[in-house]
Amino acid sequence: MKQLIIIGAGPAGISAALYAKRANIDVLVIYMDKSSLLMAKEIENYYGIESISGKELFETGLRQAERLGIELVKDEVISLGYSDAYEVITKNNTYKTKALILANGAYRNIPPVKGVKEYEGLGVSYCAVCDGFFYRQKVVAVLGNGAYAYHEAEYLKNLAKEVIILTNGKEISEEKLKEFKVIQDKIETVGGDGKLEFVSFKDQRLAIDGLFVALGTAGSADLARKIGIMVDENNKIVTDENMRTNVPLIYAVGDTTKGLLQVAKAVYEGALAATDVINRLREH
């Protein structure tokens, strides 16, 4: 079991890892090459650096962590859980930890499908663990084509009457999804009378009771909901002044919290969260 796992290797995650490692905390960083930092062509407003690309800064952070001996694992986190400790469930493994820092961004993959936004909470959900109970013995669909979609479908199959995979025109990237009925046609719209009742394609209409969106990979807010962490109306994780969430020894830092979307803020919050983790682990 790890003392601390950090999900995300951007400025917030690596900053937290550096502080934790230097305090002799056993830390693991799990990450994917999916960071808003990578989209920054040029950064010129960060102290001590005249100009650097986001990609270069991201790679420099990874090298810095490696030099300090921080364990880095490149894998996709698909869920969080708890048994005798917190569990970080990835595509390839399950890790246990005493403390957790969420630093993998606040993106939510909302599909550009007519009606999806309007039916959120009325049949459209982004969390199988949160809402699957309401669809017992009903027909549901999971929108996605990868490992995250498979994880949601696997959870739902124990509750729903039938689980159908919708890829919205994309090829399947997770072979295990073929265990379910798959429709690869492009979706034209979703609709219903006051609540979600169907998904329409060019040549057919599929009657469903619920649609679970699981596109791409899970962001911090998606993971937070699975373990009862508070998320506000803007999809930001709620934290206190030390970056603590409402769940003990779980923190959120960087773009997933409210405030400036800046490297300087992310680095500060990572350091702040790690410092608090260090003190609380030593107390325990």
Image (spheres, helix red, strand yellow):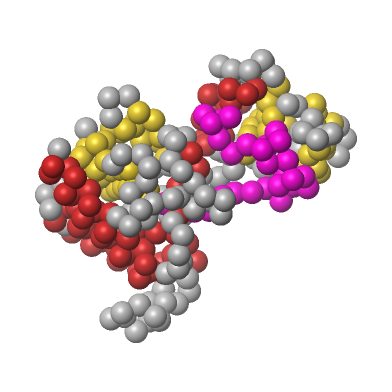
> Residue 156 lies in what quarter of the image?
top right
Q: Which residue is found at the position 59% from the left and 43% from the top?
A: 215
Q: Is residue 248 left or right of residue 198?
A: left
**Does the rendering let one see residue 115?**
yes
> Residue 276, position in %: x, y?
22, 52
Q: Which sits in the foreground, 57 or 220?
A: 220
> Residue 170, position in %: x, y?
67, 42
Question: Which quadrant would the C terminus be assigned to in this image?
Answer: top left
Q: Which residue is found at the position 32% from the left and 65% from the top?
A: 267
Q: Which residue is found at the position 42% from the left and 77% from the top?
A: 43
Examine the rendered structure and indicate whether residue 183 appears above or below residue 255: above
Spot the residue most to the bottom.
Answer: 50
Q: Which sits in the foreground, 84 or 105?
A: 84
Q: Which residue is found at the position 55% from the left and 45% from the top?
A: 216
Question: Which quadrant would the N terminus be assigned to in this image?
Answer: top left
Q: Is residue 189 left or right of residue 100?
A: right
- In the image, the segment drawn in magenta is 103-131
> Residue 259 lies in what quarter of the image?
bottom left
**Does the rendering let one see residue 7?**
no
> Residue 119 lies in what quarter of the image?
top right
Asked if residue 122 lies in the magenta stretch, the reply is yes
Q: Is residue 98 left or right of residue 261?
A: left
Q: Is residue 50 left or right of residue 201?
A: left
Dominant secondary structure of the residues highlighted in magenta in the image? loop
Q: How many marks?
A: 0
Q: Which sits in the foreground, 52 or 213?
A: 213
> Residue 210, position in %: x, y?
69, 29
Asked if residue 16 lies in the magenta stretch, the reply is no
Examine the rendered structure and indicate whether residue 138 appears above or below residue 237: above
